[in-house]
Amino acid sequence: MIGPAAAQDAKTIAATVCVACHTEDGNSVIPMFPKIAGQQETYVIKQLKDFMSGRRKSDVMGPIVAQLKPEDVAPLAAYFSQQKLMPSAPGDKDVLGLGKMIFYDGNEETGVPACVGCHQALGAGFDIYPRIGGQHAEYIRQQLKNFAAGERSNDPSRYMRVTAKRLSDEEANAVAQYLMGLGGK
Amino acid sequence: MNKFLTTVVVAASLPLAASAQTPPVWNEIKGELATALQTKGDAARGETAFVACQGCHRKDASGRTSGAYPRLSGQHSTVLMKQITDIRAGRRHNPKMEPYVDDHEVTPYEVADIALYVQGLPISNENGKGPGAGVAAGKQIYDRDCVTCHGTNGEGSAEKFYPMVAAQHYRYLLRELHFIRDGDRGNSNPEMVKVIKPYHDADMEALADYMSQLPPPNK
């Protein structure tokens, strides 16, 4: 059972609140819960704030962040961004070729930008653009679905909603598998 | 009808006789374009804002040799500002790009930043080139019809908003020539449309071939 987040210390919050889904250092072992170890600090700050305001909807995270105070956000983001991301298993090898192509080139015909443009080499992310390399494929897949359906709408400029909608199911699946295998820093 | 009314009606109908309606002024400096042009761009801010463009145009703004996306590096900042604001406004038809450059993604001030940053990027000579067979014929057409606006070396004109066409991807040049000739581009310069309207497809292939082989102009 998750108790109230009494302490302001980020490490303590991680060990008592976040641990249930993300594990203590953020290397979630449950594919539907994202790994947050080594995530871009600026991105984590925005996501926590967006969960708190409801700008990003989540039946799971909504009640969780209700236990946090606004001043917990920055320390938590700093803490998780400093954790080391552990690599995931390599993805389904049958789709890695397609996944790699989408990551580096996108789809010129349908107007899918290459993920590398924003998410950088190895999908490491940068500032507002999240690290997606090494993330659970299932989680990536779900986020792409949520963006495509408009159910996730906290991308600042519809960029991910437009992109996810342009991706075919096959491409989205392939790139999620490819990204999972991109490993840590 | 009395004489006065007749005069007015005749006078009013004269310009209408020349064309169905008054054609829009090409490249009216107003709205977002005016804002961007009046902004002192910041290249460092432009570099950050340009990250969102890298997914298609690549980190070095070299575009795609397939011609799917143009090389932007070294292009005149005025041209870039005009094309971005034209695409945002729908004056230039580009449904692929439009959502990625709309006002939620980039402010008019960032348009100026990006344009300045990209203008300063080095131009690679590794652009997608045409087959080469059309270069001689293309040069003839270019020297006859295009030099006046786009320059002897395909360098374009910043002041006149005429793009640099040298060292641009062959298939991009060809596609845009088709769009401009056939009315699909949306923001074509009517003077240019007049010039290329009579071109056959083979003329445009030769022209694009020639331009794609032109080296990056010296700055």
Image (cartoon, rainbow, N blue to C red):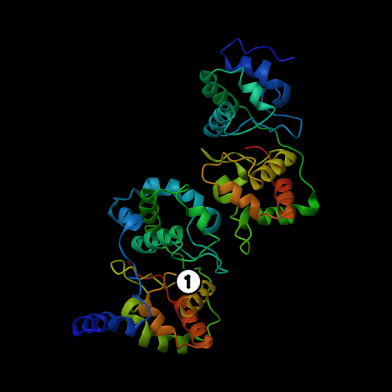
Q: How crowded is the residue under tag 1: few (<14 C-alpha within 10 Å), some, or many (20+)?
A: some
In this orientation, does residue B151 appear? no
Residue at x 66%, y 31% (from the top left corner): A58
* Quadrant position of residue B166: bottom left
The quarter of the rendered structure image containing the N terminus of chain A is: top right
Position of the C terminus of chain A, as image quadrant, is: top right
Secondary element at tag 1: loop
The residue closer to the viewer here, A72 or A9, is A72
Closest to the observer, A70 or A30: A70
Q: Position of residue B37 (x, y in %)?
A: 30, 56
| Picture layout, residue B105 above or below residue B123 | above
**Number of numbered discs visible in the structure rendering:** 1
Amino acid type assigned to the residue bearing label 1 in the image: Arg
Up-down relation of residue A18 to residue A3 (above or below): below
Residue farthest front in this picture: B1
Residue B146 quadrant? bottom left
Residue under label 1, please give it: B185
Report whether A3 appears left or right of B117. Answer: right
Relative to A155, does residue B1 appear above or below in the rendering? below
Q: Nearer the viewer, residue A144 or A78?
A: A144
Residue at x 69% of width, y 42% of height: A140
Q: Position of residue B129 (x, y in %)?
A: 52, 75
Q: In the shown orientation, is residue A87 left or right of residue B16?
A: right
Residue B206 position within the rendered picture, expressed as x and y whole percent measured from the top left: 49, 85
Q: Given the current orientation, which residue lies at the most extreme left position?
A: B4
Q: Identify the subunit bearing mark 1.
A: B
Q: Is residue A28 above or below residue A156?
A: above
Residue closest to the far top: A6
- In the image, taking residue A168 as reference, residue B120 lies left or right, namely left
Q: Where residue A116 sits: x, y (%)? A: 59, 50
